[in-house]
Image (cartoon, rainbow, N blue to C red):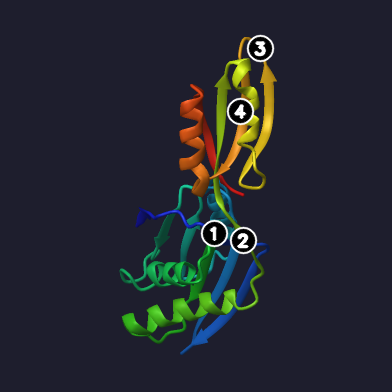
């Protein structure tokens, strides 16, 4: 299941991997938290973990990415709603983005029931978050701004690090400046660029 969420002004992202193990009525739940920046990295981590634990009964996961904020989770064969969504709720409750949480389960012979499964997956995820180091990120977007030379000074006056940063500039028939802008500042910057007659192209989002 997947959905798009609203960007946060400030988000928390993991600085390094973390993990924990939970045992519940014979079943083992191994939780791993990985910092990720895109869906390609998520797929690599999932493939690596699946390869490492080929004997596992289930490999359930959830992830959240930043700018644009989006998230997804999987029950991976567990009863619907008992694994992926509980993992995802723990990540969301912690305000985490740029994060992949994987909980690998080995069945111990005793069924836990839907409620028991949901609690176990959530508790394993929370345990993995207990020692997680995090840092703050603000959603931002790179803008390619093309203007006449006469407007370059006005564009430069918009630069206010760290909210608006000049990443590069080239000068040909027009001046082309690449600005990295916090999403919370986009309204102000977009309005100013429009008044200057700038041609603007989004190059891509990022956490800054």
Label 1 secondary element = loop
Picture quadrant of residue 157: top right
Please tell me which residue is depicted at 52% across the width and 74% down the height of the picture. 125
Q: Residue 44: image x %, image y %?
A: 58, 51
Q: Residue 78: image x %, image y %?
A: 36, 70
Disc with the residue nearer the chain's start (4 vs 1): 1
Task: Indicate which disc residue 10 carries.
Answer: 1
Depth check, front residue: 56 or 70: 70
Picture quadrant of residue 71: bottom left
Label 2 secondary element = strand
What is the total number of numbered labels drawn onto the structure image? 4
Q: Tag 2: Cα neighbours inside 10 Å, few (<14), some, or many (≥20)?
A: some
Q: CA distance from mark 3 to mark 4?
A: 18 Å
Residue bearing mark 3:
172
Disc with the residue nearer the chain's start (1 vs 2): 1
Q: Tag 3: Cα neighbours inside 10 Å, few (<14), some, or many (≥20)?
A: few
Depth check, front residue: 152 or 132: 152
Please tell me which residue is depicted at 52% across the width and 37% down the height of the picture. 189
Reply above or below: 106 against 100. below
- The answer to whether mark 3 and mark 4 are in CB contact below 8 A is no
- Side of 78 relative to 9 (left or right): left
């Amino acid at each position: 299941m997947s959905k798009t969420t609203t960007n946060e002004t400030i988000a928390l992202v993991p600085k390094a991997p973390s993990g924990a193990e939970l045992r519940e009525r014979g079943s083992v739940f191994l939780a791993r938290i990985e910092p990720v920046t895109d869906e390609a990295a998520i797929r690599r981590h999932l493939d690596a973990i699946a390869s490492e634990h080929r004997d596992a009964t289930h490999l359930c996961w959830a992830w959240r990415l930043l700018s644009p904020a989006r998230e997804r989770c999987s029950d991976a064969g567990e009863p619907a709603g008992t694994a992926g969504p509980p993992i995802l709720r723990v990540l969301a409750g912690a305000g985490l983005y740029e994060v992949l949480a994987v909980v690998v389960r080995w069945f111990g012979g005793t069924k836990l029931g839907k409620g028991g499964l949901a609690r176990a997956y959530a508790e394993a995820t929370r345990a993995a978050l207990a020692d997680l180091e995090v840092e703050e990120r603000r959603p931002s977007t790179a803008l390619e701004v093309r203007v006449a030379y006469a407007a370059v000074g006005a564009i430069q006056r918009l630069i206010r690090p760290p909210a608006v940063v000049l990443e590069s500039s080239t000068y040909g028939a027009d001046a082309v400046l690449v600005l990295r802008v916090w999403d919370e500042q986009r309204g102000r910057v977009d309005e100013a660029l429009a008044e200057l007659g700038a041609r603007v192209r989004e190059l891509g989002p990022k956490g800054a």
